[in-house]
Amino acid sequence: MITKSVVSELESIVNNGLESSPIPYTKGNSIRIKNMVVRHNSRKGYLIYDTKSNSQIARTNFKSSALAIAKNLTQGNDVTSTLLFYDKELLKHYNDVIFFKNIIKKTKDAFSAEIRETRLEISMEKTRDIKEKIDNFIF
C-alpha cells in the first residue's frame, strides 16, 4: 500500500540524488543543467546563462563546449577560459577542414591537391584531439 509518507520519502531520495549529480534536460530550444541554461542562437552560436545571477556566462561555437562549461560550473569547477580556448581552436581547425575539402574538390593541379590533402589530414586529426579534450570535461 502506498501512503503519503512513502511517497514523500521517495520524493526526497530522488531530489537529493538529483542535486548531487544534475541531469540535463531539454526545455524548448534550451538545455538546462541545474541552474545553467544553454541556448542555441543561429547567429551567435551557443549561449550559456546562469539563472541564479540572471547573466550570460559565455558564448561558444559548438554545443559540446557549451555543455562542458555548464556542467563544470554546476559542479563548482570554473574551466570556462580553458574551454573557450578549445572552442576557438576547434572552430579554426573545423573551418580549415571545410576550406581544404573545397580546394581539393575544385583544383586541377595534382601537386596542390596533394599538399591540401596532407593539411586536411592534419586539421582533421587536431579537430579529433580537441573534441576528445572537450568530451573529457563532459564525461
Image (cartoon, rainbow, N blue to C red):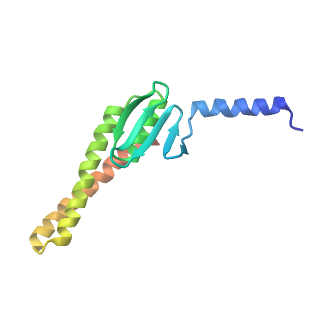
Which residue is found at the position 23% from the left and 65% from the top?
A: 101
Residue appearing at x 16%, y 64% in the figure:
116
Q: Splitting the image into 4 quarters, where does residue 102 fall?
A: bottom left
Residue 28, percent across and down? 53, 46
> Where's the N terminus, which quadrant?
top right
Q: Of residues 103 and 114, which is closer to you in this image?
A: 103
Q: Position of residue 91 (x, y in %)?
A: 28, 49
Image quarter of residue 125: bottom left
Let me know if residue 69 appears in the view: no
Up the image or down, 124 lies above or below 48; here it is below
**Residue drawn 61% across and 34% down?**
18
Image spot of residue 119 (x, y percent): 18, 59
Residue sitting farthest toward the top: 53
Picture quadrant where residue 105 is located? bottom left
Query: Total number of numbered labels?
Result: 0
Residue 82 placement (x, y as % from top left): 32, 35
Q: Is residue 11 above or below residue 136?
A: above
- In the image, 72 versus 126, the foreground residue is 72
Determine the residue positioned at 47% across, 42% down: 139
* Nearer to me, 33 or 68: 33
Left or right relative to 87: residue 76? right
Whether residue 88 is visible:
yes
Q: Is residue 133 left or right of residue 111?
A: right
